[in-house]
Amino acid sequence: MKYSKALLFTVALAATSLTAVAQDTTTPPTTPPPGTGLGAEIRALMVEHRADMQALMEQRKALLAQLRAAAPEAREAIRTELRQLMREQQQQQRELAKAIRDAIRAQRDQRRQSPTG
């Protein structure tokens, strides 16, 4: 059978456009958002900690504004408050890290104890 050049050209063009479309529709693998692999307990700890940290940062900003506007004799007292606030923040971070470690250990132990199918 004889095929016209126009028909062969159309078939070839359609085949190349199909492969181009197939290549364009594939999506690259996406990484899951941070925190999705964690348990609900750990995510709750992180949300609670984030709220506490935001409150501490607001308090710190207020103290820094007071420090800028304070008289020289009152500045040392404000600096002491800032140091105490930073110590509280560090302590909260340590407590959060310990709580997360404990939750991860509990999850790991639970997985180890659960019967495997």
Image (spheres, helix red, strand yellow):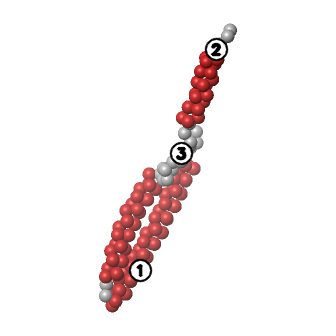
Q: Secondary structure at mark 3?
A: loop
Image point 36% across, 77% down: which residue? 64
Q: Is residue 107 left or right of residue 78?
A: right
Give whichever of 98, 19 is nearer the camera. 19
Q: Is residue 75 visible?
A: yes
Q: Is residue 38 visible?
A: no
Assign the C terminus to one quadrant of the image: top right
Which residue, as the protein is rendered here, is positioned at the far top?
A: 1
Q: Secondary structure at mark 1?
A: helix
Quarter-wise, where is residue 6 in the image? Answer: top right
- In the picture, the disc for residue 83 is 1
First in residue order: circle 2 vs circle 3:
2
Could you tell me the amino acid type at mark 3? Thr
User: How far from the left and from the top, in percent, is residue 48?
Assistant: 39, 60
User: How far from the left and from the top, in percent, is residue 59?
Assistant: 34, 72
State the separation of the CA atoms marked 3 and 1: 43 Å
Could you tell me the amino acid type at mark 1? Arg
State the separation of the CA atoms marked 1 and 2: 86 Å
Q: Secondary structure at mark 2?
A: loop
Q: Is residue 81 left or right of residue 98?
A: left
In this picture, is 25 found above or below 98? above
User: How far from the left and from the top, in percent, is residue 90?
Assistant: 45, 72
- In the picture, the disc for residue 30 is 3
Image point 58% across, 27% down: which residue? 18
Could you tell me the amino acid type at mark 2? Ser
Give whichever of 91, 57 is nearer the camera. 57
- In the picture, the disc for residue 4 is 2
Instruction: Mark 1 vs mark 2: give the one in front.
Output: 2
Which residue, as the protein is rendered here, is positioned at the far bottom?
A: 73
